[in-house]
Structures are given as structure tokens and as C-alpha cells.
Image: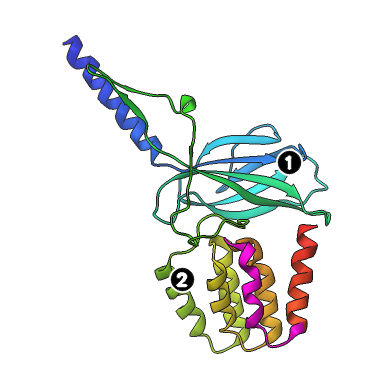
Amino acid sequence: MEMKKSILVFVTTLLVFSIYAQKPVVTFYSEDGYKFWVIIDGKRVNPEPQSDVENITMDNDLVNVTIIFENSDFPDIEKSIRGVDANGNPVLTTWRIINTNRGKLDMRASSFQQLDETTITTHTTTTTIERSSVPPVPYQQPNAVPGYNGPIGCGFPMSDQNFSDVKYSISLKDFEDARLSIAKQVLKSNCLIVSQVKEIMMLFDFEETKIEFAKDAYFHTYDIGNYYQLNDAFEFELSVEELNEYINSLEQ
């Protein structure tokens, strides 16, 4: 009887661990030590303001996050963040809060680590390791941009099929403002690659619309080191210069 009870407890433990492992985890920290509260889908995570809030389990693959600073002079940061990779696997994402040197704080994804259920098997027993004792497995983005090793602006690029659907929805709109509005909505909760940004830009008729979207898309683009590839989407050299000046101002 005792043996059956032990087996039942063991199986239950494995089941709970397996369920936990299916949920994404997220960490936030401030480079400058500013203290903040984290609000995820309307629920406050930390009762007291902290400069780093670690290992928050996300209930959904996509959540809305608000960072509220202890210093009320700093405006809130609001983002929709995704906790799974392009294949739908849960990951541990670390977001850093940085000062852009333009008097504005922003939040950038800085690392991604794969979450795996980890067990040790011996000849007689199988023991589940506590997650806190398992070193994170470095995450390798699956074929996001083959051969690309430059800076990363966001987490996991939109799949080709989803992007095709988005592009079609944008193209259905007759007016430029409507197309731009949908394109910006896509940026709020998705990550693109430069080639996808360029394809959306080519759906616009006016140069000023292309520039506006390219600026907004910068920190929602995975391979931002390839942003120069957008240059030939513009008709005028002045547009290229304006975009480059904007990017340089962000990175100073």
C-alpha cells in the first residue's frame, strides 16, 4: 500500500512539473537600478517595486505587460510580449529596461533560453530535478535568419504563413491610412524580419508612409543589423538619410 502511494505521489509530481514546464517564463531588470512594478494582463506581479523581477510564469503565450516605475516622473512602458519561439516552444525571456539617452526609458529583449523538463534516470529510480537547480540551456533561434549573427531587436519572427495572411489583409485596404493602421497593429504583438518589413513598405504608395512605418518597425525587427536593406524601398535618397539619422539617434 505504501509503495502504491509513493508511486502515485511520484507520478503526480511529474505531472505537475510537466504542466509547469509548458508555460513560458519571463524576467525583467533595469540597467540603471530603477525600481518598478510589473503588471501582466492587468495583474500586479511584485507587491513592492524592485529593480529586477525574475522568473515570472506566463499564463498565456502572448501577454500584455506594463512597467510602472516607483519614480512617477518616468512614463509607464507598455508592450505585448510573446513567450514561445517560432515553433511554439516555451522559453525564458529576459527583458532589460534601458535609458535611450533621449530622456526615455524603453524595454528590450536581451536573451532567450529554452525551457525543458529535466530528469535524471538511474538504474533503480527516476528523480525530477527542481527547476531552480537546473542551469538554463542557451537558446538557439530556429532558422530565424540563417547566417545572421548581428544585433537582435525583438524575440521570435512571425512565421511565413502568418506574415502572408497579414500582408494580404493590409493589401485589401484601399486607403493608405488604413493600410498603415493595420501594419502598426501587427507591430504591437509581433516580431518581423527585415525582408518582411520591406514587403509591407512596398504596399504603401507614399514615401512619408514608408518612412513612418520603417521607424516604428525598428525595435520590432529581429535582424536590425540588416536594416540597411530597406534603403532600396525608398524612392528618394533623403528618405534613406532620414531613416539613418533616426536610427543613429536611438543608438547614441
Q: Position of residue 111 (x, y in %)?
A: 57, 45
Asked whether, in this view, residue 167 is left or right of residue 215, the answer is left
Which residue reaches farthest left?
1
Q: Is residue 180 left or right of residue 57?
A: right
Q: Is residue 128 on the magenta stretch?
A: no
| Label drawn at residue 145 | none
Bounds of the magenta segment: 222-237
Q: Looking at numbered disc 1 in the image, what kind of residue is underneath it?
A: Glu
Query: How busy is the neighbourhood of tag 2: few (under 14 within 10 Å), some, or many (20 plus)?
Result: some
Residue 148 image point, x, y percent = 54, 60
Where does label 2 land, which residue? 163
Q: Is residue 130 above or below residue 30?
A: above
Q: Callout 2: helix, strand or loop?
A: helix
Q: Amino acid type of disc 2? A: Phe
Of the 4 image quadrants, the one containing the C terminus is bottom right
> Based on the displayed image, in which of its 4 quarters is residue 219 positioned?
bottom right
Q: Position of residue 37 (x, y in %)?
A: 67, 40
- Classified by dominant secondary structure, the portion drawn in magenta counts as helix
Q: Quadrant of the N terminus?
A: top left
Q: Nearer the viewer, residue 96 or 20?
A: 96
Identify the residue at horizontal 74%, vertical 81% (top origin).
239
| Residue 31 image label | 1
Nearer-N-terminus badge (2/1): 1
- Residue at 67% x, 88% y is 206
Q: Where is residue 19? Give x, y as percent.
A: 35, 37
- Disc 1, SS: loop
Q: Determine crowd level at label 1: few under 14, some 14-19, many 20+ residues with C-alpha closer than 10 A.
A: few
Q: Which quarter of the picture shows residue 30?
A: top right
User: Between marks 2 and 1, how big is the CA–CA gap?
Assistant: 33 Å
